[in-house]
Image (tube, coloured by chain):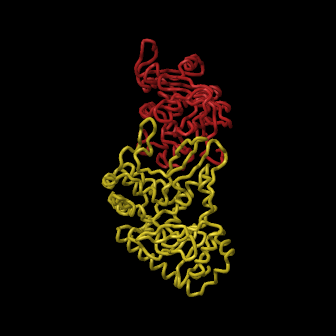
Amino acid sequence: MQKVDNPYRSIEAKVLEAITETPTIKTIRFRPAEPFGFKTGQFIEVTVPGVGEAPFTPSSRPSLREEMEVTVMKVGKVTARIHELKKGDTIGVRGPFGAGYPIDEFKGKEIAVVGGGCGLAPLRSLMYEFFSRSGEFKKLSFRGGCKNPQELLYRNEIDGWAKRDDLNLRLTVDKGDPTWKGNVGVVTTILDDLDMDYPRAIAVVCGPPIAMKFSTKKLLELGFKEKNIYLSMEKNMSCGIGKCGHCRLGTYYACKDGPVFTYDKIKNFPSIWD
Amino acid sequence: MYYISSENFSKFLVSLKKDYEVFVPVKKGQQRFYQKFTAAGADYLVGEVRAFEPLKSFFFRARERVASGFSQKIPQRLERPFAIVGVKACDLKGFKIQDYVFSNHDYQDPFYLKLREANLVISADCTSVIESCFCTALGLKPYPQMNFDLNLSSVDEGYLVEIGSSKGKRIVEKYTLFFRQPREDLMSTRNRRREKIFREVEVQVKSNGLSNQESFKGVVEKGFESEIWSEEAEACVECGACNTICPTCHCFLLYDQQNDAQMERLRIWDSCMIKDFARVAGGANPREKLWMRLRNRFEKKFDFFPKVAAEFACTGCGRCISACPAKIDIRKVLKKLVDNAKSR
């Protein structure tokens, strides 16, 4: 991991574009004044100067250093201000922090990516990485869900994914509308046909805690191993460097040891889904 | 080992003022507070017991400006290093935890490290015991054994001075005129006094039903689902005093603010007893109930730190006992946990 002199300092960044994804979610594309890379699954702290910081896993390609994107749901003080950003505005970014996905360990394996709601944001970055190394994996499946068709992130892009030969993709919404041709139901209802050698397959899950909880349960029933289920734990990550104490999860700090954990590492800790 | 007379020690403090802001414990009522040593003849005390405020406030300060705008320059304070006098063994143990947090890991905290390097710690043996003292239950002795630059043991009309670091050695060499070779009999005086205070703390620990830190191993895990937490949390008023007064508590909040010219990021002491401490913006809160937060405090001190740093994050200083308006007594909680673990 890179060492910096002052780990609390943000790097200045210029907003290049603010894209409205859904009524509650925007993607902010920005250019950091001092480019830095990240491993997919690592997160950054984004600040609206003077307002405060919030942690996001970039939704953009890890290989792109000059530009990055975060996809942000409006839920609190900082995210509300992020939603007001326009092209040319100044923000601050700090990171990357955490461990990220160990993609090299996924080589030669079957991989199921399961996402819900705004959880598709970090997973898009992961999918870009998978696509760029497509031949290295035995099989790639994507299962995405959200509340309704309007809340589906990256819809045009995902329509393109559906046409790929190297991806088996299914989507679901909790509640459909006349335009919706896909499955209706929670994301666990589209996991039965993953058709993988489950005890050896990898599952990557990211979404609201309730979706992760029931997806994990379902994946275990299918035969996935606890150590092969990768979960993105949403904790109050603030300093990003294992010091401020807010994101403790048992004997770990989500910010430095996670935020991606395999289920076996955290299953015995209390309140992991709260 | 050296000897310094009380008279020379006062002169030594005056000399130290050239290079340091010197802080000495001063007694006000029943409490001792660190106060700036202003001039020769100023009132101070070296022995007795710990000061009211924890030593951490000189190193991990309550409020630190950690970033100004996007500048790479580390914000500096325009002040001289501190020499803190009369620090007790319980506070020195706090360094073990604070050092682990701020200087370990992939990232280090430059603010803490700088103060740790610059400040001078002149510790002292405890020469009395107060009701809340229970350091021996955490494996400590009421006299410093590590993490000091110089240590003072009160003996006839002066102090035996032990050197604990190269920084301490340099100070003695620089002010060599004040120090003498000690009379041989002073060592036995020191040891006799130390043993007396140690026994007094031990008696107090036993009268509170505690033994040693071996007995604390695994008690939080075993008592995790017990009623102890809700019983103890009943009177808690969620003030966070136990956190701020604790020499090992290290949690902080990064707080951004904007002045006319630029943003500033402040690092401010935080408290895990406060409801929103672990809450995420989406609304989820892993420790919604007060008793969960009380349990979390004990989990951090008696389960997390032993597992990750092989140290209990408690020094037995008893400050949280004195500070709690609800009279929650860490010793009683520990005793309940030990009893609960035995009964299982």
| A199 or B68, nearer to the observer | B68
Instruction: Report if residue B271 is visible in the image.
Output: yes
**Figure quadrant of residue A212:** top left
Circle count: 0
Q: What residue appears at the point 35 percent right and 46 percent down from the top-left corner?
A: B289
**Vertical position of residue B156 compared to residue A244: above or below:** below
Horizontal relation, residue B256 to residue A218: left or right: right
x, y percent for residue A254? 51, 43
With B84 as the anchor, is B73 left or right in this view?
Answer: right
Q: Which chain is red?
A: A
In the depicted view, which residue is nearer to us: A33 or B257?
B257
Q: Residue at x 52, y 63 (%)?
A: B55
Give whichever of A260, A223 is nearer the camera.
A260
Residue A26 position in % (x across, y down): 53, 26
Extreme-top residue of the structure: A178
Q: Give the percent coordinates (x, y) of residue B284.
A: 42, 38
Q: Is residue B222 left or right of residue A54?
A: left
Location of residue A93 in the rendering, given as x and y in whole percent from the top left corner: 60, 38
Q: Is residue A16 above or below residue B283?
A: above
- Dividing the picture into quadrants, the one containing residue B136 is bottom left
Question: Which chain wears yellow?
Answer: B
Can residue A205 be seen here? no
